[in-house]
Structures are given as C-alpha cells and as structure tokens.
Image: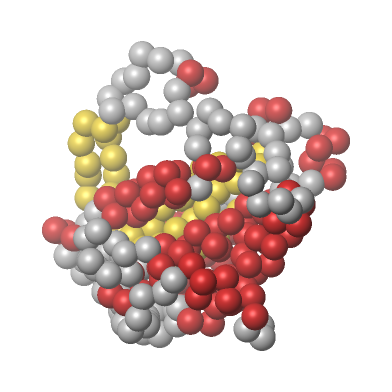
Amino acid sequence: MTGVAKNTIVKLLVELGAACSEYLNKTLVNLPCKRIQCDEIWAFCYCKQKNLTAKIAENRIAGDVWTWVAIDADSKLVCSWLVGKRDSGYATEFIQDLASRLANRVQLTTDGHKVYLNAIIDAFADDIDYAILHKVYGADPRPSEARYSPAVCTGCDKEAVLGDPDMKHVSTSYVERQNLTMRMQMRRFTRLANAFSKKIENHIAMLAVHYMHYNFVRIHQTVRVTPAMAARITTRLWSIEDLVNLMDRPL
C-alpha cells in the first residue's frame, strides 16, 4: 500500500507514539476536572496468559496486559492512562499520576476492584469524594472459557467511600463507553483476531497515538468539539498533520 517496508512503518509509529506520550505528559496538567471515572481494559501481548511459558516470559513481556484509564465525565478528556498489570502496584502508580494532573478536588468513581481504595487514599488522602459502583451480574450458562464479556448486568449498587460524593453522578458509563471506542479504533484490542500486539513497546506506542488523536483530533459526538477543546487545553481543532508533526518537536 505504501511502497515502504513494514518494519520502517512500525519504527515510525513507535517514534510517533513516544512523541505523543511526551506531549500528553507535558500538556495534561492542572486540569479543571470535577468528575472523574476510572476503569481498566484487558488485552494481551504476544500470547494469551494461558499460553505463556517460562521461556517466553524470560525473553519478553507477554500475556495479559491491562490499560488503566481515567476520563473526565464532562469534557470526555482522557486525562491519564497506564499500561501494566491489574495489581496494587500499577493501581498506585496510575492514581498518583491522575492526582498530579488535577487542579482541584474531584468526585471519583471506580468499579469494585479492591486495589483502588488504598491507591486513592495514598494519592488524595481526604481531599477526594470517592464512590464505588458495584455491578450485579446474573448467571451465565456459558463456561468461562467460551465467553469474552461478563454476564448480563442485572443491577448496580452505589457506595460512598470517601468524602461526600453526589450519588446521582456515581457512574462508570463514560469510561466504559471509552473502552468500546478503544476496541473499535484499535485493531489490536479486537477480540478473536490475530492483530494483537507482538511487542509491548508497539502496544504502548499505539495507545499514545490513539489518545492523542482521541483528545485533540477527533470531534466527540457529545461535546461537539474535541475533548481537549472542551477541557480548554487548546482552542483549535488539530489535524492528523499536526499530530504527525509532533515528531519534529524537541522532546
């Protein structure tokens, strides 16, 4: 299609990913968010966790890979993200990064993943209004190895944990919809496909390009501008050319 070797294109995309990541890291600061939603989305690198052998693990990062995501419920800006395992160490790193980017006290909602609580206490102390949304699922007749999504959600329980969260805004709907956007726009997140990442470096680079495009280039159907414009980070609509030109900026 391009007349250029595949490895050359991959190398270019990795460099672009690094430039996007650096720009997002420097730009997404002092954010005036009020309501934040957090979630994690699953993918895998090189092979699925059940096929990971000791030999593979010695040579590369492989198996389950989770992307931690925080989204502003009002502007739809993805203000923080992190790739790693779904454990307390990565939860702490993710929430610490999120806290460093916020300009004021926020209301935060997560699912019932237990590692969030200590991470949020460590990062925010008592300067947070935090609530958990517990989803209740019905029985699924399919065996676990035959399904790629949870059973049907039959209800939700809201629990105030820290501060004084407004219970009518306790929701994870926006961040879960953003997870769908990721799966639709990045082929490597598509289930039951062979386009999964083979190298963790490529996986992270693609995420950086995606979030740069999502925040600055793609007009969000709800806010009618890009999330970055809605959050007043920029006053103009970026183009793909602007995004690619990030590689020419000094890091």
**Residue at x 60% of width, y 46% of height:** 65
Picture quadrant where residue 47 is located: top right
- Decide: is 142 above or below 28: above
In-front residue for pair 6/141: 6
Q: Residue 72: where, in percent of width, then height?
A: 32, 67
**Position of 50 relative to 67 (above/below):** above
Colour pattern = secondary structure
Vertical arrangement, residue 140 with respect to residue 245, above or below: above
Instruction: Name the residue at 26% across, 33% down.
Output: 153
**Observer-nearest residue: 247 or 193?**
247
Q: Where is residue 167 in the image (x, y as percent from the top left)?
A: 16, 59
| Among the 4 quarters of the image, the one containing residue 194 | top right
> Is residue 95 visible to us here?
no
- Residue 241 in percent (x, y) is at 51, 71
Q: In this view, does 103 lie to the left or right of 56?
A: left
Residue at figure coordinates x 38%, y 45% from the top left: 180
Query: Is the residue 123 above or below the residue 160 in the image?
Result: below
Residue 112 position within the rendered picture, expressed as x and y whole percent measured from the top left: 37, 47
Where is the C terminus found, in terms of image quarters?
bottom right
Regarding residue 156, the answer to whether it shows in the image is yes
Q: Camera-side residue: 215 or 100?
A: 215
